[in-house]
Amino acid sequence: MFDELSYDRRRFLRDAAAGAAAVSTAGLAAGAPARAATTTATTTGTARSGAVSFRWWGTSGWRIDIGNRTVLVDPYLSRYDTGLFTGAFDEETPLAVCPTVIDRLVDRAENILVTHTHWDHFNDVPYIAERTGARVIGTLTAYHLGLASGLPSGQLAPVRGGEVLDFGAYTVEVVSSLHSRNGAWSMAFPGVRVSRPPKPEKISDLPEGDTLAYQIRVDGGPSVFFMGASDFAERNLVGLAPDVAMVASAATTSTADYVPRLMAALDHPKVVVPVHWDNFETPLTNPPTVAPNDRRRLDDLIAAVRKASPRSRVLVPEYHTAYRF
């Protein structure tokens, strides 16, 4: 049964949050050398100290710094060529990791939130988790792919949706979600992993594996909703009422009334940030490279948000920039 008291409390907390719809930014150097990775995953209730910032890393990837603690969402930094953006897509493309790029950007991580396990979301996760000691939170498929990639079970946290995980300075609410549909109303590499597979070697070894969304609620700060794909189950979103929503751009029109239903289900967030519109097989440098079709999709998304939720501010992000909500 729908909990009206919980819903009203969430709306009150959202509407009472400091800063209203204000957004500030501060540039952060992409090429700054990272410190040696010594941070290990922790569940202690350490209070946050300092500012809370959100940095976009392309696709649906984010780095969230909550004082001296760091959470990553779908960190895909290697961004290698599969032919996807040139009309020569090769599903046999070998998986690859680019340490020289990753190590400059990832000095620490406490938790890594995985929305789904396609290569442009999961590819770099095992390497980052091994390097930093971060906990990987994701579907059962993410759990088994993590095992197959050499991560210990104690570093993997399988979730389904509905969990609210308390990390002291912030909570992570897990939301059961849906992957977007292509023009044939299907998707690339469907399927799940219900047991540990062989070590993945090519991009087709990383299936969708079910899809999640996440809402991070910072103690004394904003509540921010993260999508990794452009579909959703609206009943699972009712009551979240985030201050900020990171909204995936839709590749097709296969999902009916995508933006109006999403804005209504999220109770018209103060700030909407489009994601998953850049060419993620190009270097992570500004300005982001955008294919012509994706530029049209981005423009369509912005127009649809402004029509469906005119009071929402649309913020089109740049890489490596610290956004404070």
Image: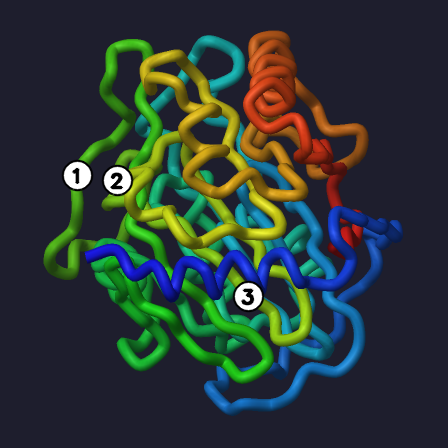
Label 2: element kind: loop
Task: From the viewer's perspective, tell me whether residue 9 is left or right of residue 34.
Answer: left
Q: Amino acid at mark 2?
A: Pro
Pointer 2 residue: 207
Of residues 157 and 122, the one nearer the viewer is 157
Nearer the observer, 292 or 124: 292
Image quarter for residue 195? bottom left
Q: Nearer the viewer, residue 243 or 323?
A: 243
Q: x, y percentage for residue 284?
A: 70, 38
Q: Nearer the viewer, mark 3 or mark 1?
A: 3
Q: Residue at x 41, y 28 (%)?
A: 261
Earlier in the chain: of badge 2 and badge 1, it is 1
The amino acid on which the numbered mark 3 sits, given as a three-letter code, is Arg
Which residue in the protein does label 1 denote? 191
Residue 304 visible in the displayed image:
yes
Image quadrant holding the N terminus, namely: bottom left
Q: Quadrant of residue 135?
A: bottom left
Tell me which label, 3 or 2, sits earlier in the chain: 2
Q: Which residue is mark 3?
A: 217
Q: Position of residue 87 (x, y in %)?
A: 46, 9
Residue flagged by tag 1: what amino acid is it? Gly
Horizontal placement of 138 versus 46: left or right? left
Gap in angstroms between the C-alphas marked 3 and 1: 31 Å
Residues at discs 3 and 2 in contact (Cβ within 8 Å): no
Q: Which residue is situated farthest in the left direction here? A: 194
Q: Residue at x 68, y 82 (%)?
A: 48
